[in-house]
Amino acid sequence: MLLRHFALLCCFLGIYRLSAQTFQPVGGPVHQQELALEQANECYLFFDNPGGDSLTLRWRKVEVSMPDDWDAALCDYGLCYSGIPGNGIMNPVTGATQPYLKLIVLPGTTEGAAWVWFRVWEDGNETNFVDVYFSLHTQGALSAGAVAAPEFSFYPNPATSALRLDNPAASAIVVRLIGPRGETLQE
């Protein structure tokens, strides 16, 4: 009987540990980088696996804002793609190995800035996610992440049915409400 209780406890702790898996972007969720014109630029977002357990990450493209003349391709810890596909899954990692998303951007001769937003989550647990961003620019252009955000407030946070937005600025702003799965709920 004691052995059965011990086995159940070990099973419960094992399940709890799997559900408590954590990961985080190394250096924060925003990767800012200046791009060189007329060459391929590699831009990495690494993820830390502090528990060292087996970890498999999935990702979904949420939004891309990039000059039309720029070419971009995406690699994750597993595959390289032509362009930036809508979603993917990385190879499993254990220990200190860091999975990653890598953008390869060729701006050609076009100056400008780009903003690429991904949602990354633990395979099998979409509630354990982090949103990460590539904020890229060429010399002489402002970083997409450096653009001053308009001052506004929203409440209550969290909201269950109604959300109030206050914009003290004299100019109109566009606000997009994004759901937990990355879908636009309202704009």
Image: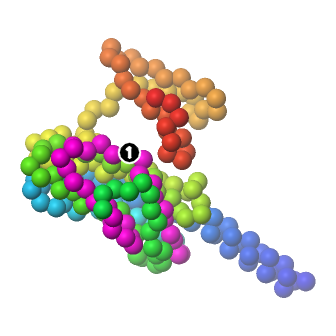
Q: State the residue at coordinates (49%, 27%).
A: 154
* Direction from residue 143 to residue 140 in the image, left or right: left
Q: Is residue 136 above or below residue 152?
A: below
Numbered circles on residues, count: 1
Q: Using the image as rendered, state which of residue 9 and residue 99 is in the foreground.
A: 99
Q: Position of residue 44 (x, y in %)?
A: 29, 62
Residue 73 within the segment the image draws in magenta: yes
Seen at 10% across and 42% down, the residue is 140
Instruction: Check disc 1 and report the residue beneath it.
Output: 63
Magenta residues (range): 53-81
| Placement of the N terminus among the 4 image quadrants | bottom right
Q: In x, y percent, where is residue 84?
A: 34, 56
Q: Identify the residue at image location x=64%, y=33%.
A: 160
Seen from this angle, which residue lies furthest bottom? 3
Task: Report whether 92 appears left or right of 78.
Answer: right
Q: Position of residue 89 (x, y in %)?
A: 46, 66
Residue at the farthest right position: 1
Residue 50 versus residue 66 in the image, above or below: below
Q: Is residue 66 covered in magenta?
A: yes
* One can see residue 87 in this view: yes
- Residue 96 image position (x, y, % from top left): 42, 76
**Above or below, 2 relative to 106:** below
Q: Quadrant of residue 71?
A: bottom left
Q: Residue furthest front?
A: 82
Secondary structure found at label 1 = strand
Residue most toward the top?
Answer: 170
Depth check: give the residue in front, 185 or 167. 185
Q: Residues within 10 Å of mark 1 (few under 14, many from 20)?
A: some
- Amino acid type at image mark 1: Glu
